[in-house]
Amino acid sequence: MVWVKLRVSLLLLLLVVRCIALEEPKKNECVCGHPGIPGDPGHNGMPGRDGRDGFRGDKGDRGDLGPLGPEGQKGEIGLQGDRGIQGPLGTPGEKGEKGDTFFIPKSAFSVGLTEYTKLPPANAPIRFDKVIYNRQDHYDPQTGRFTCVVSGAYYFTYHITVFSRNVKVALVRNGVKVIHTMDNYQSSEDQAAGGAVLHLEKGDKVWLQVAGGELFNGLFADEDDDTTFSGFLLFGAE
């Protein structure tokens, strides 16, 4: 009876071992079971670092120019920008060449009679011996003639005091009478004047002379009354 029980126990033990051996998966074999429950989604990973710049590629060929479109309308003028900061001074340039000297020609005179030169001879230059201005010496008191040194336009004028007889004088250029002045004596001291603008060339001569003879030689001068002759350059010849 004991032996029978022992034998049954051994058989049961073998059966259990066999069943365990059958259920144990063999090496390299897949154990197929029922699908499991899906797991929760995982969290997003951290952004990765930027990759390194790639090598610069070769320059491509220039493309063909397309047709030009119509010219657009001119835009409006923009607002003026703010004034910029003043820049530093530049390097001084080289010294330039010396220019031509600017020369202003000068020519002028003003003379008068004294009581010792009253009644000058007719038809001859009146020798005004009272020099008021003659810085350039273009007027000669010995001859009574003005000689042009600078070609150009000149203004000549004279002022005469008339006394004791009639007066008739002429402004003369190179022997040709240009203008005349006539004043009749009327038993009192009188005044007469004349003037003209003349164009002169270098070497031309101008003077004042009595015209019409001794009867028209009433020029007068004393301490209180003057008879004068003046002229000056307006501008040089262009």
Image (tube, rainbow, N blue to C red):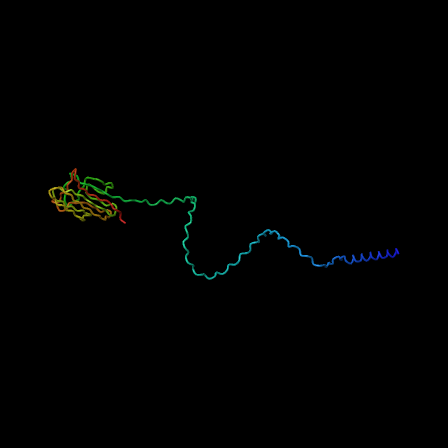
**What is the total number of numbered labels drawn onto the structure image?**
0
- Viewed as shown, does residue 70 lie left or right of 134? right
Q: Which of 66 and 117 is in front in this view?
A: 66
- Viewed as shown, does residue 97 lie left or right of 127? right
> 34 above or below 106?
below
Which residue extends farthest front? Answer: 1
Q: Where is residue 160 in the image (x, y as percent from the top left)?
A: 16, 43
Which residue extends farthest left? Answer: 187
Q: Nearer the viewer, residue 194 or 48?
A: 48
Q: Nearer the viewer, residue 185 or 33?
A: 33
Which residue extends farthest bottom? Answer: 67
Q: Position of residue 147 (x, y in %)?
A: 22, 45
- Viewed as shown, does residue 59 lie left or right of 115? right
Q: Which of 187 and 113 is in front in this view?
A: 187
Q: Where is residue 89 in the image (x, y as percent from the top left)?
A: 42, 44
Tell me the quarter of the picture where residue 228 sits.
Answer: top left
Q: Where is residue 29 in the image (x, y as percent from the top left)?
A: 74, 58
Tell me the quarter of the picture where residue 190 sits.
Answer: top left
Q: In which quarter of the image is the N terminus?
A: bottom right
